[in-house]
Amino acid sequence: MVVSAEVLLQESIIEALRQCMNDGSLPLSAVPDDIVIEKPKNPSHGDWSTNAALRIVKHLPGRTPMDIAQTVVAHIPEHTAFSSMEVVPPGFINARLSEEFIAAQLQEMYNSPRLGVPEADDPLTVVVDYSAPNVAKEMHVGHLRSTIIGDALTRILTFLGHTVIRENHIGDWGTPFGMLIEHLIDVGDAEGLEELSVGELGAFYRQARTTFEGNPAFQERSRRRVVLLQSGDPATLKLWRTLVDASLDAFETIYSELGVLLTREDVAGESQYNDGLAQVVSDLRSWNLLVESDGAQCVFPPGFFNRDGSPLPLIIQKSDGGYGYAATDLATIRDRVDRLHADRMLYVVGMPQSQHFAMVFAVASMAGWLPSSVEATHVAFGHMLGTDHKMFKSRSGNTFQLQRLIDEAVDRARTAVVERNPELGREECESIARMVGIGAMKYADLSNDRTRDYVFDLDRMLSFEGNTAPYLQYAHARIRSVFRKGNVSPADTVPSLPAHAPAERALALHILSLESVLADVARSCRPHTLCTYLYELSSLFTAFYEQCPILKAATPDERAVRLALAHLTGRVLHEGLGLLGIAAPDQM
Ligand code: ARG
């Protein structure tokens, strides 16, 4: 197993502190829990650094951070991983890893098909709720973001050995279905399906809405249809199924274009929880949590307020008896906890629903449906903005069609790929263009902190320079080309020799943090951390490539070590991009 140097240093410091407490050299009552281990910005300050002494001094008046740091260092257990521990003002401890340690760790990683990343000892069952578009409505950019982020998290958690259950909580139930079904009857199955199947979901919905608004008789029919739907009328259910299937076909076209993992088996739409809704209400009522407010059945979880300071209700059942979105989400939580035995539930949904989830989780805890041993997290994300920094809209003012967005990215990627590789065959070009175009779109989304809005800028995301997918894919392809050109197989490389040049050492050290980066993403659900890691890896590789000739190295040993570093970099890029759902072509 690859040992994280960061963890090793942390453990060594804690061990040293215990000894200092035992022999009285640092009379602390407990080891402080706010010790930070970080990578110094300036590499001459060592490979890892800690502020431990600066934290401890607060508990030991009269001592100085410098003297504390020296005492700690004197107690650090002998470990071959560190070649030096230096104390520098105002009291930092800077550790430098030994070359033997780096070489041994690299070799571990090199020999491991999983790049030294262990599978969780204690695998969790994680439900990832993502994508979740609405039937007979267009999938919009918010659903696109959810699909991309949720898919990356799913891949990373699965790689780390967890049991991941994907749930596509599509909006396939509710009052609009009365209107949609009546509209389907009016336009006829054939035409309706035609419209739906080409992905014109938005148009279908808008037409239904327009008819509904201008036609009282249609409104009445729609209302009756909702009642029929809820009572399980077979003919109505059949029409409903037609709508759902047509929409799923349209969604699946997008999923397969994007190469995401979601399949039809992952669909767990709102309709699936109908049977649990009445139970949600009656249980809440029997525990005296339900309060009637303006005719609606509500729960008032503590800590939520309206703007005017009055308590904010979560509406469970509307005054007309209909159940809302919140009731469905409560029934969903019960299902995920009781039937699926989830340890962790991630909801990859836009930021505007933050309050909804906070309240739903609060009510679920009050009702005992969400035990404290189960984590429920809203993995919120910001808006996608146009290059004008306004909310993303198509030129015509309707919600932009995702398919067109994808086509445009692939078209532009094709142009770039053809320009750079005029010798490539048509088919090959096409396949690379898809990897680059779609990879660029995904990466542009994933590389920003998800909670922030980001600008959808095709020119920038497709640039071969900067923090973009093409830049990373190109670094990977360049490594593959070194091996092609040199006609060497990875088997001819030697990973175990210590690397000497500063660019080699910096690259090697960076490679070794893969595991801790993935652990961090799994915890924080922030895939941009992995993007930053891969971008830095590519930049360090570029520096190494420029400073350290690989095929023309001075000695066979040096050549073998450099080939090994290049090969390992290539594998990490390939795996890392793959975990983000991005393909890495062998040439581009
Ligand atoms: N269909 C919803 C929407 O389009 C998203 C559903 C998210 N998941 C959930 N469990 N509420 O906004």
Image (cartoon, rainbow, N blue to C red):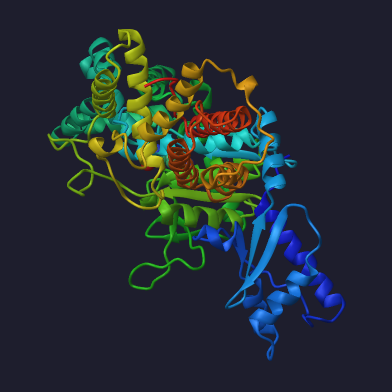
* Place of residue 439 in the rendered image (x, y in percent of width and height, measured from the top left): 38, 30
Find residue 292 and report its image quarter.
bottom left
Q: Nearer the viewer, residue 458 or 397?
A: 458
Q: Is residue 123 visible?
A: no
Q: Residue 83 vs residue 478: left or right? A: right
Q: Residue 80 vs residue 268: left or right? A: right
Q: Nearer the viewer, residue 256 or 11?
A: 11
Q: Residue at x 51, y 67 (%)?
A: 302
Find residue 206 and report its image quarter.
top left
* Place of residue 85 in the rendered image (x, y in percent of width and height, measured from the top left): 69, 64
* Place of residue 152 in the rendered image (x, y in percent of width and height, measured from the top left): 49, 36
Q: Nearer the viewer, residue 553 or 364?
A: 553
From this view, report whether residue 580 is shown above or below residue 11: above
Tell me the quarter of the image containing the C terminus.
top left
From this view, report whether residue 330 is shown above or below residue 427: below
Q: Residue furthest right?
A: 23
From this view, report whether residue 151 is shown above or below residue 9: above
Q: Nearer the viewer, residue 237 or 269?
A: 269
Q: Residue at x 71, y 46 (%)?
A: 101
Tell me the quarter of the image containing the N terminus.
top right
Q: Is residue 186 visible?
A: yes
Q: Residue furthest front?
A: 554
Counting labels gives 0
The quadrant where ligand 1 appears is: top left
Find residue 278 and report its image quarter.
top right
Q: Residue 331 vs residue 294: left or right? A: right
* Place of residue 378 in the rendered image (x, y in percent of width and height, measured from the top left): 49, 50
Q: Residue 28 vs residue 294: left or right? A: right
